[in-house]
Amino acid sequence: MVIVDLLAATICFAGACHPALVGQDTPTGTYSLSHRRVEDPGYDGSVLVFKENEKYLWAIHRVYLLNPGERRLERLQGGRADMRRYVTKGCINVAPEVYRQLVDCCARDVLVINKPRS
């Protein structure tokens, strides 16, 4: 099972938690993950889709770096959860090494996204 905590801006799996970038529109709930190839260079070849509709696709992917003004990598590496929230348009961004670990262990696993009460 993969668990994302929106308030802490973390993703936890295989006994460890890692920082993640999340967005105001990241949906809460339980989803099935699906590994998918993509051509867009900003995603480095693949994403883990967890929700989609006719207009949008939500996924876990490597930190998106094609808009340097957003400082996503810097925010991801920072220690403050408040700097990792409200960054994306709903996807979950993780460091490339975290993404590789996630694909290796959990590409067909269940994803739970929650927003615990503060």
Image (cartoon, rainbow, N blue to C red):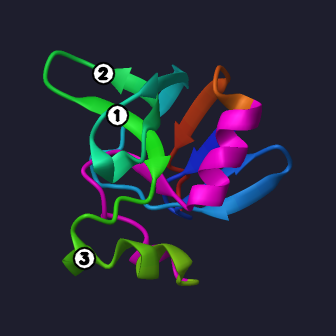
Q: Relative to 75, does residue 114 appear above or below in the rendering?
A: above
Q: Residue at x 53, y 55 (%)?
A: 117
Q: Residues within 10 Å of mark 1 (few under 14, many from 20)?
A: some
For discs 2 and 3, the disc positioned in front in the rendered view: 3
**Position in image of residue 60 (x %, y %):** 47, 42
Q: Which residue is mark 1?
A: 58
Residue type at tag 1: Trp
Q: Is residue 22 visible?
A: yes
Whether label 2 touches label 1, CB < 8 Å: yes
Q: Relative to 12, does residue 71 appear above or below in the rendering?
A: below
Q: Relative to 63, does residue 35 appear above or below in the rendering?
A: above
Q: Tell me which numbered mark, 2 or 1, is placed earlier along the sequence.
A: 2
Is residue 93 located in the magenta-colored stretch of the structure?
yes
Residue type at tag 2: Glu
Q: Which mark is residue 52?
A: 2
Pick the residue in front: 66 or 20.
66
Q: Secondary structure at mark 2?
A: strand
Q: Residues within 10 Å of mark 3 (few under 14, many from 20)?
A: few
Q: Which residue is mark 3?
A: 68
Q: Residues within 10 Å of mark 2 (few under 14, many from 20)?
A: few
Q: Which residues are magenta?
A: 80-105
Q: Residue at x 13, y 24 (%)?
A: 55
Q: CA distance from mark 2 to mark 3?
A: 26 Å
**Position in image of residue 37 (x %, y %):** 42, 27
State left or right for residue 84 relative to residue 114. left
Q: Is residue 28 visible?
A: no
Is residue 57 located in the magenta-colored stretch of the structure?
no
